[in-house]
Structures are given as C-alpha cells and as structure tokens.
C-alpha cells in the first residue's frame, strides 16, 4: 500500500514543531503569533508566505525566516559532511528508468483535474499544493509500476 502513513506523520510532526517554534518565537521576539507560526513551519519561502499572507501574517518576515532556515540547513549539512570526511568520491551508477508517456499523461491529468476541483471548491491551499494533495495519495497507494517489476525480474 505504500508508505503514505509516513507522509502523514511527517506532516503532523512538521506542523507541531512549527507551532512549538512559532510560540517560542512569538514569546521571545514580540512577533505576532501568525507571522511566527508561518516563519517556523518548514517549507519554501513562497509556499509558506502566500498562505501566511492570507491569514494576515507579515510576508517579508516569513520569507526572510524561510530563507535563513534553508541557508542554515545547507551550511549545516555541508559542514557536517566535511567534518566527517565524506568526500562524495563514490562511484556514480547511472540508473535508467523508462518513462511511460501514457501513464505520465494520465498522472498529470488526474493531478490537474483534482487540483482544479479543490480550487473550485475553494479549499484554502496554494495552487501547487492543490495538485500535490491529489497526487501524493495516488502515487503512494498505486501498485508497483511495470518497469519496476521488469527491473526486479532481471536482478537490477
């Protein structure tokens, strides 16, 4: 059935941590709770700032906090990998997986139609999130694709 429950758990955990960090930020910096929450939730600057603006948050502070968070993550990961001697010198193995145009077209059509339906129902999400909301359950619960079965049969 896929690992859809892990995606749900990660979303709940990210939201809970964002709420906790948002309360901490609001309390100790004097930022309003709405701005602090959206500044603390993991995501891209645009993807978080747009719903934040809809709820009355200060988008400039959200974008700045999101950009700083991404910068800190990148610097921390690179520094950690360097300190542990990870050089990235492993041999590169190219993976060839065929793209099935018909299946990809169907997936895109379902995503766009589902996203359009959510937008028409006025579900308060950013447009890109509408499509993702439809496609995540579809791709995580779908049976294994034909090419994956062929690769495993060949021992790849």
Image (cartoon, rainbow, N blue to C red):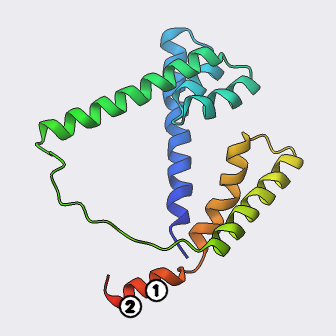
Query: Disc 1 designates what residue?
Result: 149
View extreme (top): residue? 30
Query: Disc 2 designates what residue?
Result: 153
Q: Which quadrant would the C terminus be assigned to in this image?
A: bottom left
Residue at screen point 64% across, 19% down = 59
Location of residue 17 in the rendering, given as x and y in whole percent from the top left corner: 49, 37
Between the C-alphas of marks 2 and 1, the distance is: 6 Å
Query: Looking at the image, which is closer to me, 38 or 155?
Result: 155
- Residue 62 occupies which quadrant of the picture? top right
Query: Looking at the image, which is closer to me, 143 or 38?
Result: 143
Residue at screen point 58% across, 12% down = 31
Residue at screen point 67% across, 74% down = 102
View extreme (right): residue? 120
Question: Where 86 sits versus 153, above or below?
Answer: above
Residue at screen point 50% across, 10% down = 29
Location of residue 51 in the rendering, given as x and y in whole percent from the top left corner: 70, 31
Q: Are marks 2 and 1 in contact (CB under 8 Å)?
A: yes
Q: Would residue 15 appear left or right of 109 to someone viewing this image?
A: left
Q: Residues within 10 Å of mark 1 (few under 14, many from 20)?
A: few
Q: Secondary structure at mark 2?
A: helix
Q: Would residue 62 appear left or right of 118 to someone viewing this image?
A: left
Query: Residue 66: which numbered mark, if any?
Result: none
Q: Secondary structure at mark 1?
A: helix
Location of residue 155 in the rendering, given as x and y in whole percent from the top left corner: 31, 87
């Amino acid at each position: 059935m896929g690992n859809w429950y892990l995606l749900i758990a990660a979303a709940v955990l990210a939201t809970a941590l964002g709420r906790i960090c948002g309360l901490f930020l609001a309390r100790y910096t004097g930022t309003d709770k709405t701005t602090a929450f959206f500044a603390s939730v993991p995501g891209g600057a645009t993807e978080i700032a747009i719903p934040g603006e809809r709820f009355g948050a200060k988008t400039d502070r959200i974008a700045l906090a999101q950009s700083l968070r991404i910068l800190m993550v990148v610097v921390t990961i690179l520094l950690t990998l360097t300190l542990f001697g990870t050089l990235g010198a492993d041999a590169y193995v190219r993976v060839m997986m065929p793209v099935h145009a018909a299946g990809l077209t169907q997936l895109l059509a379902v995503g766009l139609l589902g996203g359009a339906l959510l937008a028409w129902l006025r579900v308060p999400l950013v447009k890109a999130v509408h499509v993702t909301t439809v496609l995540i359950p579809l791709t995580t619960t779908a049976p294994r694709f034909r090419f994956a079965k062929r690769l495993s049969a060949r021992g790849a």
